Amino acid sequence: MTDPVTPLVSHVIQDRPTKRSRVRSPSINAESFDLALDLLNNDDQLPVYLKTVLGHVMERIFSMELLIKKNNELEERVKAEIEEKNKLKD
């Protein structure tokens, strides 16, 4: 008598990728965020390595914000130049 072979993972799990739900940040204003960062930075009970990691993360966030702003400016410039080019063609 042979035993039926059962798959290690069902086909349903293999075929359907799982979707992650979006993580939404709480709606806070810049002042309360800055205050929270200041409190964390001045907390003597917070380990130095955690403050260092937090500092690096914040630098990355600020860099990304600058890059996004620059990208938006460049997109607007390209759109304006394309419109000007199309007007010159006509």
Image (cartoon, grey):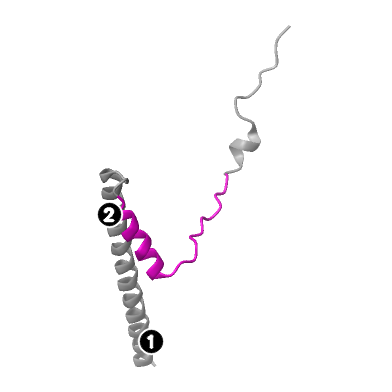
Residue ID at (34%, 87%) = 85
Q: Is residue 77 above or below residue 61?
A: below
For the residues bearing labels 1 and 2, Cβ distance under 8 angstroms:
no
Q: Position of residue 14 (x, y in %)?
A: 59, 36
- Residue at the outermost front position: 44
Residue ID at (28%, 63%) = 63
Count neighbours of disc 2 (C-alpha within 10 A) and say few if under 14, some if 14 to 19, many if 20 or more.
some
Residue identified by numbered label 1: 83
- Which picture quadrant has residue 41? bottom left
- Residue at the outermost top position: 1
Tell me which segment is drawn in magenta. 18-43
Residue situated in front as seen by the camera: 19 or 44: 44
Residue ID at (38%, 92%) = 87
Residue situated in front as seen by the camera: 85 or 52: 52
Q: Identify the disc placed on residue 55.
A: 2
Residue 15 covered by magenta stretch: no
Q: Earlier in the sequence, mark 1 or mark 2?
A: 2
Q: Position of residue 89 (x, y in %)?
A: 36, 90
